[in-house]
Image (spheres, rainbow, N blue to C red):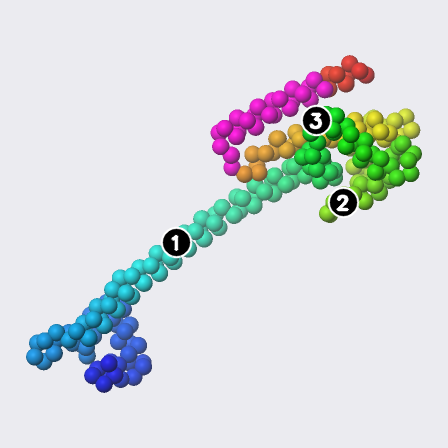
Amino acid sequence: FGDGAGGDFGRFDSALVAMFRLTAGMGWIESLPWAGPDGALQYGHVLFVTSYVVAVNWTLLQVSVAVLLDSFVTARLGSQREPEERAAEERAEGSTMRSALDPLLDRLASDFVDDADLTARLRALFKMLDSDDSEGLNSQQLSMGIKKLDFKPRIHISDSDFAIITQGGALCAPDGRLGPAEFEAAMRRQLRHHQQRQLAYAPWAGPMGRAEAVQLGALKALFLEQMRAHDEGARRDA
């Protein structure tokens, strides 16, 4: 329209202002009259202005505003949820990762099939850790053996960890080391405590429905009953 409407479209900056006025709803562009001097409709001018208003003002601008509002609301809700989710994750991680053996216990808990299979796995693990075939593991030997297992990051067992695992030496053989039977008893005890922690802090892992909460409560009750029966049996054997 540079020739017929030079006042508004003769230069780029003038055309930019004219189109901005049209976008802002400031009225019809006067240099593009909808009717000619004879009153006949100027289809070119009308088609351009109306199609621009429909495409830009009524469609693109509305879509852009809706997208911006949706992005703002999503970002706002996300910023409100992030601190709560981060705090829940930190509580869950801080509550469940209480043992240096947790990576090993996770694998044992997920791999064994039944009681006999768990016994076989613990015996095989003891043989792997007992590198000198002395049928006994002290704190240093247990630490060195577990450090060689295929875990990333490596598992490090300190003297204090060894004391916790053996209940201050109460689970050790008379020589102060863990034999095959003592090792199995200590690892079973650690595995029970590990599973108990996982059950206790499962609600922090994420949202759950009513059915899942009921199932979790039943598992906790069953696990506690098994632990009570095991402890009573251990006291009778002692």
Q: Alpha-carbon neighbours of circle 1 within 10 Å: few (<14), some, or many (≥20)?
A: few
Q: Residue 208, percent across and down?
A: 51, 34
Give the number of the mark in front: 2 or 1.
Answer: 2
Residue occupied by mark 1: 70
Q: How much space separates mark 3 and mark 1, taking CA atoms? A: 52 Å
Give the number of the mark in front: 3 or 2.
Answer: 3
- Can residue 98 be seen in this snapshot? no
Q: Nearer the viewer, residue 131 or 103?
A: 131
Q: Amino acid at mark 1?
A: Asp
At a point 57% along the width and 38% down the height, the residue shown is 205
Residue 226 horizontal side relative to residue 149, left or right? left
Q: Amino acid at mark 2?
A: Asp
At a point 8% along the width and 76% down the height, the residue shown is 39
Quadrant location of the N terminus in the rendered image: bottom left
Residue 11 horizontal side relative to residue 216, left or right? left
At a point 26% along the width and 81% down the height, the residue shown is 9
Element type where label 1 sits in the image: helix
The magenta segment? 207-230
Residue 42 horizontal side relative to residue 60, left or right? left
Q: Residue 27, percent across and down?
A: 20, 70
At a point 26% along the width and 72% down the height, the residue shown is 21
* Residue 214 included in the magenta stretch of the image: yes
The mark nearer the N terminus, 3 or 2, is 3
Question: Image quadrant of residue 219?
Answer: top right
Element type where label 3 sits in the image: loop
Q: Alpha-carbon neighbours of circle 3 within 10 Å: few (<14), some, or many (≥20)?
A: few
Residue occupied by mark 3: 114
Q: Alpha-carbon neighbours of circle 2 within 10 Å: few (<14), some, or many (≥20)?
A: few
Element type where label 2 sits in the image: loop
Magenta portion: prevailing SS class: helix
